[in-house]
Amino acid sequence: MNSIGRKLIPGIILGFLVLVALAMIGDLKQVGEVFSRFNWWMFPLALGLTLFNYGLRFVKFLYYLRLIGGEKIPWYEALRIFVAGFPLAVTPGKVGEALKGVWINQSSGVPVGKGISAILAERISDGVAVLLLSTLGVFAYPQYWPAFGFILILMMGLIMIIQIRPAALWLLGWGEKIPLVKNIMVHIRDIYEGSYTLFKPKPIAIAVGLGMVSWFGEGIGFYFILTGLGLIPDIKLFGLAVFVLSFSTVVGAVSALPGGLGAAEASIAGMLTLLGGIPAATSTSATLLIRLATLWFGVLLGLIVWTFSLDFLGLRKQNGKMD
């Protein structure tokens, strides 16, 4: 529990500072005025579409569990693992998400490395999905081509390297001969074996397809927030909302910052102003609202699950007491 807490605290503090900084940059008084005019009926719609995103991503998570041998995990236990992992996204570099591999192992006996491979595959397939969603936007705003191309090549290159099995097995065998790393190579081999299965053409196509639909849902939620702030509801605003949220999600992911904090917010607010000509106070307010409806909503759900998942936190009840 102490270890998990130490990993979460920096991310939570950073998240608070980012929210405060955003409000101040957008002019606190003006941001307050924008919030006072916001149609709050749009916020539940955004939360509902975030849940839609989580629902489809959970289907993908179940699919991945079956592929790595975790078919013995009941769907409700898999859901507990999935949602409990949300707060781990705000750990530095998201390294805390590796803990989900331990939870998968405890629930099914699947090696921790294979469980971690499912987490990696989930993240990479989500990255490819949001990149594809932002494709039309990149055509409309060619200044984003360099960043788009670099990230796409990086992700596709990683998938291709994993699928070149002889080379990967040679590297694993070579690593097992190095004294400093040979003791952890068994886990790295498990991660590779799981990744090799999950990144085959059929699984990656299914995962990316589910990811595109799920993240498109969050883009619609962002559109509702923008219209709730008084912006004209038209196809141009809709396209801008989907593109900005998709591309900013990738920016936050590759930044390796906890939950993409700072990078994602700056990207969302900056792109809304630069590309959409939206006033700074409105862009800032939209950024605050969508991050509350997505990242921090997920963290809250995960923390709620933690309250009845003491085994995940290294705690368990004995004779009415916790140890």
Image (tube, grey):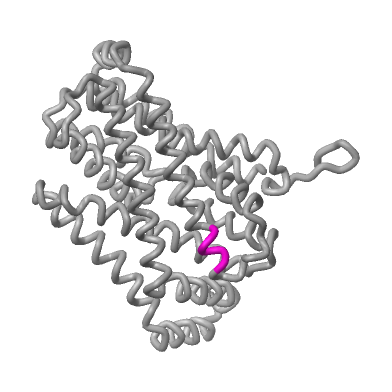
* Picture coordinates of residue 69, whole percent (x, y): 61, 70
Residue 190 higher or lower than 53, as above or below = below
Q: Residue at x 32, y 26 (%)?
A: 21
Q: Position of residue 226 (x, y in %)?
A: 25, 27
- Give the vertical position of 102 relative to 226 (above or below): below
Q: Quadrant of the N terminus?
A: top right
Judged from this view, the residue extending furthest toward the right is 319
Residue 101 at what x, y percent from top left?
59, 60
Picture coordinates of residue 165 (x, y %)?
41, 84
Magenta segment: 62-66
Q: Nearer the viewer, residue 300 or 135?
A: 135
Quadrant where the image shows the C terminus: top right
For residue 279, what is the image quadrant? top left
Residue 108 lies left or right of residue 142; in this view the side is right
Which residue occupies the foreground of this view, 14 or 239? 239
The reply, left or right, for residue 133 in relation to residue 307 is left
Residue drawn at x 35%, y 42% as measured from the top left: 217
Residue at 40% x, 64% y: name it.
Answer: 206
Quarter location, residue 241: top left
> With 217 as the anchor, is 139 left or right in this view?
left
Query: In the figure, 314 relative to 299: above or below?
Result: below
Main SS category, magenta section: helix
Q: Is residue 14 visible?
A: no
Residue 319 is a magenta residue: no
- Identity of the residue drawn at 30% across and 29% down: 224
